[in-house]
Structure formats: structure tokens, C-alpha cells
Amino acid sequence: MGWKLNDLTARIGAPEAMIFGLSGYVFRGQGTQHVLYQGFAGDGEGSGVLHELWWSSEGWHHTNLTAQASATPIANAPSGYTFEGLPDGAQQHVVYQGFVPGQGDDGHVHEIWWDEDDKHHNDLTKKAHAQPTLGDPFGYEFLGQHIMYEGDDHHIHWLRWDIDNGWQHTDLFGFPTTMDAPLALQGPTAYGFAAQGTHHVLYIGTDNHVHELWRDSQTWHHNNLTLAARAPLASDLATGFTDEAERAQFVHYRGTDGHIHQLHWVNGAWQWLDMTANFGGPLASSGAVPTGYLFPADGTLHVNYLGADGHIHEYWRDVFGWHHNDLTAATGAPLALSNPTAYAFAAQSTQHVMFVSEDHHVIELFWVPG
């Protein structure tokens, strides 16, 4: 049936969204979908309230996470993930930088986490005695729980949860194998590579190169991906994902030329591809951060970004190669104000792309098989 449009804010009467960005994910254990965002207070200001839109077989619902967890207000954008490798049941987690009304960002990494029983709030900076954060933290599950962030020293810092000792803090620039890494200009994103059993943390250095801090079974290492792939300079944050069947990694970013660039790792080497020049599509919007995912049902790869025209665009790859698609034009969607978040929902064989529109609504573009 192709791509469809759903205005989630209008559908369920949820609060309007700030344009800082969304975080979306699938909770496999419960067969649910989740989208997190900060509310909009008007006059360009965020409300400090962290909201959740979640889907079950009964449809979409809204939850005020800040109120339910009695949590510290959120400063900017959230990062959500599931933690399903637990003996006593799966959990959901969202991490964010806190905000003190009348003062500003508190420089602390906060989390709201919940299981079947209740919602809870933690100040992880205090718990782990960690370096203050400058920007938004990034959380993910890969052989445990992990949170990456840029500290006020412009180092990349790692918070990890240990079942015996709780939350632990590490400065990733503090290893002999990472001491040549430059200071961070824009904070990190991260992913796990199951085929290799490795962690990969991406950030933009002060040289405008895409840098990678990666961890094997021994220690952390540093790699300059821009030099390794002979790629153009980056202007905005890079994101990555893996194709485990192909044993490949994909990293995408907006270059200083406004193009969407891809760094592709396979057979031990990084390669560069200018997706805009090769496959069409408009220049990316200033501040654009692309997001990508694998769609196993069709064996396709997808990369979404906010174009300079206010449209959500997609590059997608099948057995014939890469293609460009204007999802806004295909669905008649309103213009976008935020970067998209996107994921595949394997249980339904569907794809989902979410963004904040001009009227501060959360818009879902979803693809269903036909």
C-alpha cells in the first residue's frame, strides 16, 4: 500500500512538540512503538516536559513521563532505548540533559526508566560521579546499557550500567589508544556491531572530521573516518547503523557542501559515497542529522533526512542499488521543522518515520506492505 500519513498529535490530542527532535524505537518484548519528545510552551520555548506517544494493538496513547516519574525537566532532546536483556523483565529508558527553570541547563545526565510496575528518575551524573555534560546524551543497548555524551572538557564520556556496581563513568579519551583523538565539536551517537562484537561511537571533531571511538574485547580505539575514507568535511552530527547479514557498517552525515555523505565499512575498509551527487535529492537543511535503519522484511536499507525544502527525504537501497524518494510529496505531509527519527517494526512488517511539523505536531509517515 506504500507510504501513509498520520498526525499523531491531532489523532490523540497530545501536547505540541518542541523542534529539538524526536527519539523513536520499537519495544520488541511488548510489540509496541514509542516516540519521545519535549513539549512546546509557545514563543519558541520548550515546556521542559518529556512526553511519550506509544502504540499498542489498541492504537496510539500519550504519557507525561516527567509527571509520572516526578523527574527533572528536560533541556533539549531525549534519547530513548529498551533494555531487554534482564532476567526479571525488560525495561525502557530515556536519557536527557536536565534543566533548572530560571537558571538553564544543569549539565547533568538524567534518566527516566520504567518496567511493568512503575516509572523512576535518576540523576546519573550524581550516581556515577561523572563529568558534567555540554549537550544531549545518547543511550543504547548493546551487551548492556550504555550512554555517551560530550563533557564540558570536550571529551567523549561513557556511562555504563553494571549489575553489581550500578552506573560507572569512563573518559573515553583516557586510554593510550585514544589519546590522539581530537576534542569534540559536536556530541556523540553510537551503535553496536554484533557481527564483530564491537561498540562504535561517532562524533565530529574540532577539525570537522568524522571520528570514531570503537571498542573490541580489549580496549577502546580511535579512528579518523574522514581520513580513512577520504571523505569531505562534516558540518553536522553523524549517525550510524549496521547490516549484520552483510557484516557492514553505514555512517551518514551532512557535509559542508550540504550533501548527504555515506561512509561504508565492509571487508575491513571504509569507503565514501556522495549520495546527493549520485542519487539526486535536494541539499540537506542546515543542522540536518540523517537517520538510517535496516528493513529486514524487504532486505532494504533506508536513510532519512530533512531537506532544505522542508521535506523529509529518503535514500533507500534494494538489490538494484540506491534510490531517492520525497516522502513529504508522496504522502502530502506538512513541512517539517525537526530532523526525523525512523525505525522498522518487524512484527508488523512496517516502516515508520516521525518528525515535528510547522504547527508543532508529531507527524508519522508509515509504510505498509500491499
Image: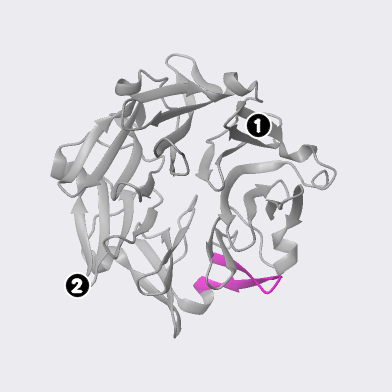
In which quadrant will I find the N terminus? Answer: bottom left
Furthest toward the right, the residue is 176
Q: Return the residue nearer the eye: 43 or 193.
A: 193
Rendered residue at 38%/55% (across/down): 342
Compared with 327, 65 (above or below) is above
Element class at badge 1: loop
Q: Distance between the residues labelled 2 and 1?
A: 46 Å
Compared with 194, 34 (above or below) is above
Q: Is residue 287 left or right of residue 156?
A: left
* Residue 1, disc: 2
> Is residue 267 found inside the magenta-colored segment of the image?
yes
Marks 2/1 in contact by CB < 8 Å: the verdict is: no
Q: In this view, does 309 lie to the left or right of 173?
A: left
- Residue 354 location in percent, x, y? 32, 52
- Residue type, numbered disc 2: Met
Furthest toward the top, the residue is 102
Q: Which marked residue is nearer to the observer: mark 2 or mark 1?
A: 2
**Which residues, given as a range, are shown in magenta?**
260-276
In which quadrant will I find the C terminus? Answer: bottom left
Q: Mark 1 points at which residue?
A: 151
Furthest toward the front, the residue is 87
- Residue 140 location in percent, x, y? 51, 44
Element class at badge 2: loop
Rendered residue at 59%/69% (across/down): 248
